[in-house]
Amino acid sequence: MIEHIVVGAIETNCWIYTWDESGDSAVIDPGADPELIVARLKRLNLRPRYILLTHGHFDHIAALPELARAFPGKEPPVIAIHQEDAKYLGPEAYQVHVESFTIAAGNADYIDALWQDMPAADVLLAEGANIGPFKTLHLPGHTQGSVGFLDEKAKVLFSGDTLFKAGWGRTDLPGGSWPQIQQSLRRLFTLDGSIRVYAGHGPSTTIASEQGGLL
């Protein structure tokens, strides 16, 4: 089951993915509006096992502190991000976000309006790491730690801001690289064309729909 919530002023796609009948689930990219995300989880009677971040930009993680606090107990959700984007979480994260967002928007007002101290990651991902039903694909270019989460069995890919429908993520922010994102896109285009792609912004697509059309 895939649940979709568009969150925040930047209209980030937050995904709730359930992969078995027991209700094992993950929240992917909780970018804002934690109350909406928590309400959807509770309506579905889900307690997420994981909070998975395709990268560390603020519009993909702003709801993380409240979401993590909403599910306390002996087994709180496991927060996972690629090791190259770990700096976007934890006690030193504020300045990193201010720098990045000021370049993107000219000021850090959006950060300051929503900021809460970020928890550190529980798991630092690397290429090929398995987490839940997913294989981690390291896809640098938008950020150095951008990843895709691929469920090979279900043929589902959460691509973050690497691959959009008829587009890709910007590369002019700290850690961005145009040559790297080209390489990451070419890698994705070698995957099974029937894989459904759920991006960080905008509509979903398939690998086949994007192959050959971008580069």
Image (spheres, rainbow, N blue to C red):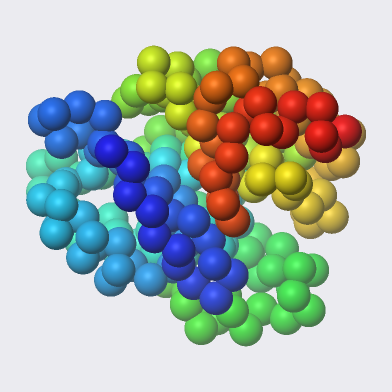
* Residue 76 falls in image quadrant: top left
* Residue 32 falls in image quadrant: bottom left
- Residue 7 as seen in the image, left or right of residue 82: left
Q: Between 64 and 153, which is closer to the camera in this rendering? A: 153
The residue at 83%/37% (across/down) is: 214
- Residue 19 as seen in the image, left or right of residue 209: left
Image location of residue 125, percent across then percent down: 50, 29
Q: Quadrant of the N terminus?
A: top left
Image location of residue 149, percent across then percent down: 49, 31
Residue 65 in the image: above or below residue 149: below
Image location of residue 99, percent across then percent down: 72, 66
The residue at 75%/27% (across/down) is: 211
Residue 79 in the image: above or below residue 173: above
> Is any part of residue 117 visible from this angle?
no
Image location of residue 16, percent across then percent down: 33, 47
> Is any part of residue 23 visible from this angle?
yes
- Residue 172 as seen in the image, left or right of residue 109: right
The residue at 21%/55% (across/down) is: 41
The residue at 48%/44% (across/down) is: 53
Q: Quadrant of the C terminus?
A: top right
Residue 67 in the image: above or below residue 20: below
- Residue 40 as seen in the image, left or right of residue 130: left
* Residue 101 falls in image quadrant: bottom right
